[in-house]
Amino acid sequence: MRRKYLQEHKKWLLIIIASIIFCLGLLVYRPVQDDDLPEELFIDEKESETNREEDITHTIIVDIKGAVMNPGVYEVVNDARVVDGIQMAGGFKEKADESQINLAQKLVDEMVIFVPEEGEVLIEQSFKENGGKININRTDVEDLQQLSGIGPSKAKAIVDYRDQNGEFKNIESILDVAGIGEGTFSKIQDEITVR
């Protein structure tokens, strides 16, 4: 009896089975709608704009003086070196004393580069700038020891940290130096600058 029933309704059973397979296929292979995507796949427009801004190269302004072909104020990329600034200024004059210039030093905004002529003594810029504050991005161990509570070992630690990690972004960054805590920082915060 089953066989007879199956043979009589074989056509309808095949149509039902084919319909079920077709519906399952639609569910599995249907086009993906935006509503079905996880939120992580969508990039927030604000994030996208932020990423675009980060891709833009920031520039800084430096003043190049002395024995260069074209002294003046130049706009350079943020990670440029002194050698790049000198090249922008047309290179050294014939009389320039290149041995007194650190060509590998990174440029920073508002920096002045003075190229002396041969026989001319390069006068070191005073590192006490900006109302008597010491620029912790430019000074050496001796000048750092002028700060309240900073001895030779802390001064060396500051210079070593700067050499390994790059310039301090703000005065609070000095807290990242081993041996400089809140107490020391409170003593020197009014005596230091990063510009």
Image (spheres, rainbow, N blue to C red):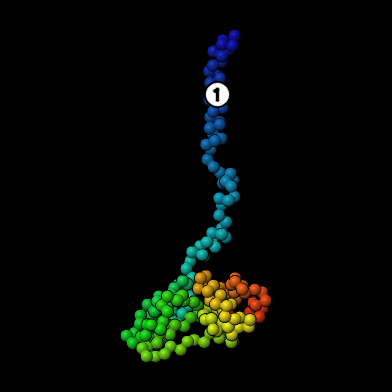
Nearest to the observer: residue 86 or residue 16: 86
Question: Is disc 1 surrounded by few (<14), some (14 to 19) or many (20+) residues within 10 Å?
Answer: few
Picture coordinates of residue 6, whole percent (x, y): 56, 14
Amino acid type, label 1: Ile
State whether residue 48 appears in this view.
yes
Question: In the rendered view, does 79 fall on the left or right side of 6?
Answer: left
Nearest to the observer: residue 50 or residue 98: 98
Which SS class for mark 1?
helix
Quarter of the image with the C terminus is bottom right
Picture coordinates of residue 148, whole percent (x, y): 63, 83
Nearest to the observer: residue 85 or residue 29: 85
Nearest to the observer: residue 54 or residue 3: 54
Rendered position, 178 above or below 46: below
Picture coordinates of residue 128, whole percent (x, y): 55, 86
State whether residue 76 appears in this view.
no
Rendered position, 122 above or below 107: below
Which residue sits furthest front?
153
Residue at 34% x, 84% y is 93
Residue 72 sits in quarter: bottom left
Residue at 39% x, 79% y is 86
Picture coordinates of residue 105, whole percent (x, y): 45, 76
Residue where numbered disc 1 is placed: 17
Quarter of the image with the N terminus is top right
Residue at 58% x, 47% y is 38
Residue 91 sits in quarter: bottom left
